[in-house]
């Protein structure tokens, strides 16, 4: 038995290292998964905090991953509304199931690799944008989150779609949401 202990120790250390490595790689997925009964705030927090960094690392520039923001309208005599919005910069982007998409022109970041939010052209209901783009927006189920991969079709006309958008100032007045200036979206 004494001549085998170095091999047993090496095997045990390799097993522990493999378990730790796998655990560190899968930790964001375990923390970011969304069971069915989760509240909107908890679902958005798990997406933004755990899955966005994980998916951005895994995509390695093949696709951007959008963060989600929650907006709340004041009562003003009507029932208050709560909804979600994500910014899409007209490049291939994984976007979770949100109520609205704010379309923005993509702008290269200061390092030349990161894409940041440029001029926001307006907002549109996400389901309406999926109708417009058709099969270019496949649905995904990512760890309990419904997501869509938005890709701008080469034959789509930006100006024609911009006419269908709610202008940003009207969207801000109605839903009380403002885009964060030059928010980094990921690496192209």
Image (tube, helix red, strand yellow):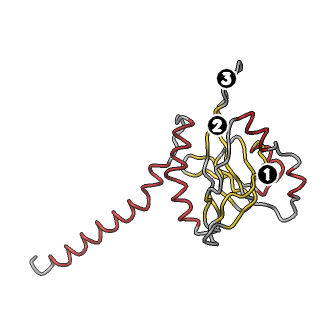
- Which sits earlier in the primary sequence, circle 1 or circle 3? 3
Please determine whether, in this image, residue 117 is positioned above or below residue 39.
Answer: below
Residue pictured at 34% horizontal, 63% vertical: 19
Asked which secondary structure carries label 2, the reply is strand
Q: CB atoms at circles 1 and 3 under 8 Å apart?
A: no
Q: Foreground residue, 98 or 21?
A: 98
Q: Foreground residue, 20 or 10?
A: 20
Quarter-of-image position of residue 187 = bottom right
| Measured Cα–Cα span from mark 1 to mark 3 | 27 Å
Q: Quadrant of the C terminus?
A: bottom right
| Residue 134: x %, y % from top left | 81, 53
Residue pictured at 54% horizontal, 34% vertical: 39
The residue carrying mark 2 is 71
Q: In which quarter of the image is the N terminus?
A: bottom left
| Measured Cα–Cα span from mark 2 to mark 3 | 13 Å
Please determine whether, in this image, residue 37 is positioned above or below residue 2.
Answer: above
> Can you name the residue that lies furthest to the top here?
77
Q: CB atoms at circles 1 and 2 under 8 Å apart?
A: no
> Can you name the residue that lies furthest to the bottom here?
3
Quarter-of-image position of residue 104 = bottom right
| Residue 46: x %, y % from top left | 51, 46
Asked which secondary structure carries label 1, the reply is strand
**Direction from residue 68 to residue 19 in the image, left or right:** left
- Which sits earlier in the primary sequence, circle 1 or circle 2? 2
The residue carrying mark 3 is 75
The residue carrying mark 1 is 121
Residue pictured at 63% horizontal, 54% vertical: 66
**Direction from residue 67 to residue 119 in the image, left or right:** right
| Residue 68: x %, y % from top left | 61, 47
Structural crowding at the residue carrying mark 3, measured as other residues with C-alpha within 10 Å and reported as few (<14), some (14–19) or many (≥20)? few
Please determine whether, in this image, residue 28 is positioned above or below residue 100.
Answer: below
Structural crowding at the residue carrying mark 1, measured as other residues with C-alpha within 10 Å and reported as few (<14), some (14–19) or many (≥20)? some
């Amino acid at each position: 038995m004494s001549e085998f202990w170095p091999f047993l120790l090496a095997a045990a250390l390799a097993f522990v290292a493999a378990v730790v490595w796998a655990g560190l790689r899968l930790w964001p997925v375990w923390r970011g998964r969304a069971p069915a009964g989760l509240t909107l705030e908890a679902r958005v927090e798990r997406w933004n905090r755990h899955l966005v960094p994980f998916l951005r690392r895994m995509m390695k520039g093949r696709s951007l991953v959008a963060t989600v923001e929650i907006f709340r309208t004041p009562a003003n005599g009507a029932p208050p509304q709560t909804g979600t919005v994500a910014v899409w910069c007209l490049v291939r982007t994984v976007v979770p199931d949100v109520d609205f998409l704010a379309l923005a022109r993509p702008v290269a970041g200061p390092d030349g690799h990161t894409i940041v939010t440029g001029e926001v052209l307006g907002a549109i209901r996400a389901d309406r944008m999926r109708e417009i783009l058709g099969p270019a927006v496949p649905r995904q189920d990512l760890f309990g989150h419904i997501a869509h991969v938005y890709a701008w079709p080469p034959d789509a006309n930006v100006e024609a779609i911009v006419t269908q958008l709610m202008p940003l100032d009207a969207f801000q007045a109605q839903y009380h949401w403002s885009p964060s200036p030059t928010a980094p979206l990921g690496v192209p």
